[in-house]
C-alpha cells in the first residue's frame, strides 16, 4: 500500500531527475521569479501607473491579494513546519537552498494568486494559469518542494484570490472605497 508521502517522493524524484544543465536551470530560475511577492507588487505598480482606471482597480486588488497570500502561506509554513525535501532525501539534485519550511509552496501560491487575478480581470485565465503550473514544476525540479507542497500552494493561492475578488465585488466594499476617495 502506498502512502501520500511515497507518491510525493516518487513524483518529486521523477521531476527532479530530469536533465539538468545551465539552460534548464536558468530557465527554472526565471520561471520561479514569477512566484515572488516582488513580482506581484511590480506588476501592480506597472498597472497602477500605466493601466488607466481599470489598471488602478486591478493593481489595488492584486496588491491586497499578494500580501494576504504571502502572510497566509508563511503562517501555514510556521504551523506545519515540514522540512524541505533535500534535507530528507539524499538522492535529489539540489539547485537551491531555502531557509524556511516546505509546506505549502510560497512561490506556487503567489504565482497562482497573481495569475488568477490577472487572468480573470484581463480575460486571459486559460493562458495565465499555465504560469503557476510551471512555477510548481520548477520548484520540484530544483528539489525544494514535494508535489503536495506545490498542489496545496496552488490551491491556497487560488482560494485567496477568489476570496479577495469576491470581497472586492461586494457593494459594501465598493462603497467603502468610494468613501475613502473623498
Image (cartoon, helix red, strand yellow):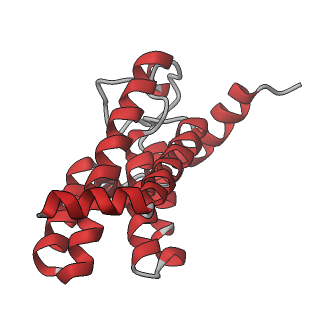
What residue is shown at x 42% (from left), y 53% (from top)? Answer: 164
The N terminus - image quarter = top right
Q: Where is 45 relative to 17, above or below?
A: below
Residue 168's spot in the image, x, y percent? 39, 59
Q: Where is 117 relative to 1, above or below?
A: below
Residue 93's spot in the image, x, y percent? 44, 37
Residue 21's spot in the image, x, y percent? 36, 55
Q: Where is 88 relative to 57, above or below?
A: above
What residue is shown at x 53% (from left), y 23% (from top)? Answer: 89
Q: Nearer the viewer, residue 179 or 109?
A: 179
Q: Name which quarter of the figure residue 161 lies in.
A: bottom left
Taking 108 as reference, is 61 left or right? left
Q: Nearer the viewer, residue 168 or 112?
A: 168
Q: Nearer the viewer, residue 98 or 143?
A: 98
Q: Name which quarter of the figure residue 42 lies in.
A: bottom left
Residue 95's spot in the image, x, y percent? 34, 40
Q: Nearer the viewer, residue 127 or 118?
A: 118
The C terminus - image quarter = bottom left
Q: Where is 176 relative to 12, above or below?
A: below
Residue closest to the far right: 1
What residue is shown at x 42% (from left), y 63% (from top)? Answer: 171
What residue is shown at x 41% (from left), y 75% (from top)? Answer: 121
Residue 27 shows up from this direction? no
Residue 150 shows up from this direction? yes
Q: Name which quarter of the figure residue 14 lies in.
A: top right
Taking 180 as reference, is 63 left or right? right
What count of labels does the image hold?
0
Amino acid at each position: 500500500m502506498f502512502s501520500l508521502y511515497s507518491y510525493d517522493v516518487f513524483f518529486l524524484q521523477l521531476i527532479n531527475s530530469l536533465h539538468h544543465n545551465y539552460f534548464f536551470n536558468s530557465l527554472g530560475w526565471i520561471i520561479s521569479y514569477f512566484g515572488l511577492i516582488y513580482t506581484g507588487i511590480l506588476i501592480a505598480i506597472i498597472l497602477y501607473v500605466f493601466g488607466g482606471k481599470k489598471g488602478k482597480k486591478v493593481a489595488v486588488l492584486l496588491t491586497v491579494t499578494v500580501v494576504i497570500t504571502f502572510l497566509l502561506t508563511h503562517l501555514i509554513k510556521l504551523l506545519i513546519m515540514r522540512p524541505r525535501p533535500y534535507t530528507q532525501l539524499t538522492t535529489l539534485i539540489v539547485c537551491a537552498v531555502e531557509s524556511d519550511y516546505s509546506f505549502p509552496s510560497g512561490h506556487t501560491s503567489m504565482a497562482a494568486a497573481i495569475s488568477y487575478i490577472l487572468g480573470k480581470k484581463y480575460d486571459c485565465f486559460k493562458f495565465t494559469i499555465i504560469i503557476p503550473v510551471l512555477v510548481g514544476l520548477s520548484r520540484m525540479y530544483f528539489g525544494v518542494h514535494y508535489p503536495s507542497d506545490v498542489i496545496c500552494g496552488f490551491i491556497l493561492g487560488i482560494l485567496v484570490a477568489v476570496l479577495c475578488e469576491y470581497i472586492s465585488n461586494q457593494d459594501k466594499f465598493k462603497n467603502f472605497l468610494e468613501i475613502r476617495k473623498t
